[in-house]
Image: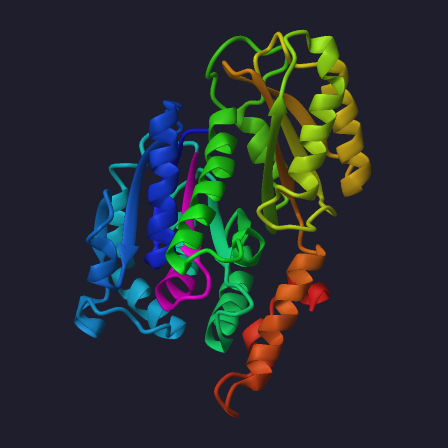
Amino acid sequence: MKAVLLGVGQAGGKLTTALAEFDADAGYGAVLDALAVNTAAADLDPLPLETVLVGQSRVNGHGVGGDNELGAEVMDEDAVEVLDALAPKVTAEAEAVFVVAGLGGGTGSGGAPVLVRELNRVYDVPVYAIGVLPGRDEGTMYQVNAGRSLKTLVRESDATILLDNDAWRSSGESVEGGYAAINASMAKRVGLLLAAGESVEGVAESVVDTSEVINTLRAGGMAAVGFASAPAAEDAEENVTTVMSAVRSAVMTGMSLPNATEADAALVAVAGDPDRISRKGAEKARKWLQEETGSMEVRGGDFPLDSDRVAALVLLGGVERSRRVEEFLERARQAVRDEPEGHIDPAEAFQNDELDDLL
């Protein structure tokens, strides 16, 4: 899938950089171009991307201080400037635009939904969001911001791929080191998802193409992506169990949103040397995924790579009712209740027809 990336806010800019660098280092060519947008000049300066500083008349390059209402306002005011900078990058070759943002901060949580809405008005290609959920220890404001932003992103985007910070942060890591590791993990997952729609190396028996990714996400709502790999024998017949184990691990322990096993649609791509990929193992894995997700819409295919390992890349679409999402939404609701009286009306903050049955 040929994609253009738009990073919004500090976390969005860093994750977009990681995605672009992963694709460039691997030579996949799936990321056509990338742009980073922020209200804080200091967050844009270190990024090796073209950048746009918005809200200068309101915050003078100093950020919005976690205020996502202000973040939405300044992005709405300066959306044309962002679209003008993005326009030369979204060429006829582009098959999708991904808006990447942390959902806890002010610029990302407030600005990303605004840009997704505007992009959908301008372009015919799908506009997806990649949203990073804040950890439990990141404070009340971040939970409220993320809850409000998520319900709007789900409404405005063609699909929203979620990354749960809590799932990827290792104990004992520094904050900066932890986020760098999270970005690297997510960059691999989304980077391979984009590359899986491209013909990379070798000839697959049943290759995964861009349409498979788009169709898996077509139902909209929330999505998650998982990855796992294992050493492979040279003989494909010896890799039946290896393929099965890789797919199970991708779903059970390698998802960007853990415990998201109930889904409306799924895609499993088995990556590796075509001569090592077990057809029997791939079919068994697809049937297992169908049973695990409860979906009759499970697609499968190969992702040929020159490697002595077999890897599984799993995309789940429609994971709104996963336990992890429900836990996060409850944290967000509680954060709203804990805020000073009169600040936000909980019913207003979370009213969304598409999510009513989750709340």
Residue drawn 65% across the image and 71% down it:
330
> Was residue 108 drawn as part of the magenta stretch in this picture?
yes
Asked if 47 appears above or below 140 in the picture, the reply is: above
Asked if 81 appears above or below 295 in the picture, the reply is: below
Q: How is the image coloured?
A: rainbow
Q: Is residue 57 left or right of residue 186?
A: left
Question: Where in the figure is residue 300, as x and y percent of width and height?
Answer: 67, 25
> Was residue 77 drawn as part of the magenta stretch in this picture?
no
Q: Is residue 122 visible?
A: no
Asked if 33 appears above or below 199 in the picture, the reply is: below
Question: Where in the figure is residue 272, as x and y percent of width and height?
Answer: 57, 17
> Which of the 4 image quadrants contains residue 216?
top right
Q: Is residue 43 left or right of residue 331?
A: left
Looking at the rendered image, the quarter that the C terminus falls into is: bottom right
Residue drawn 48% across the image and 87% down it:
343
Q: Is residue 357 left or right of residue 347?
A: right
Residue drawn 17% across the image and 70% down it:
60
Q: Is residue 239 visible?
A: yes
Towards the viewer: 1 or 95: 1
Towards the viewer: 107 or 274: 274
Question: Where in the figure is residue 143, as x and y percent of width and height?
Answer: 52, 71
**Residue extending furthest toward the front:** 172
Residue drawn 61% across the image and 75% down it:
333
- Magenta span covers which residues? 96-111
Asked if 118 appears above or below 267 in the picture, the reply is: below
**In the rendered picture of this protein, how many numbered marks are placed on residues?**
0
**Residue extending furthest toward the bottom:** 341
> Which of the 4 image quadrants contains residue 355?
bottom right
Question: Where in the figure is residue 246, as x and y percent of width and height?
Answer: 67, 29
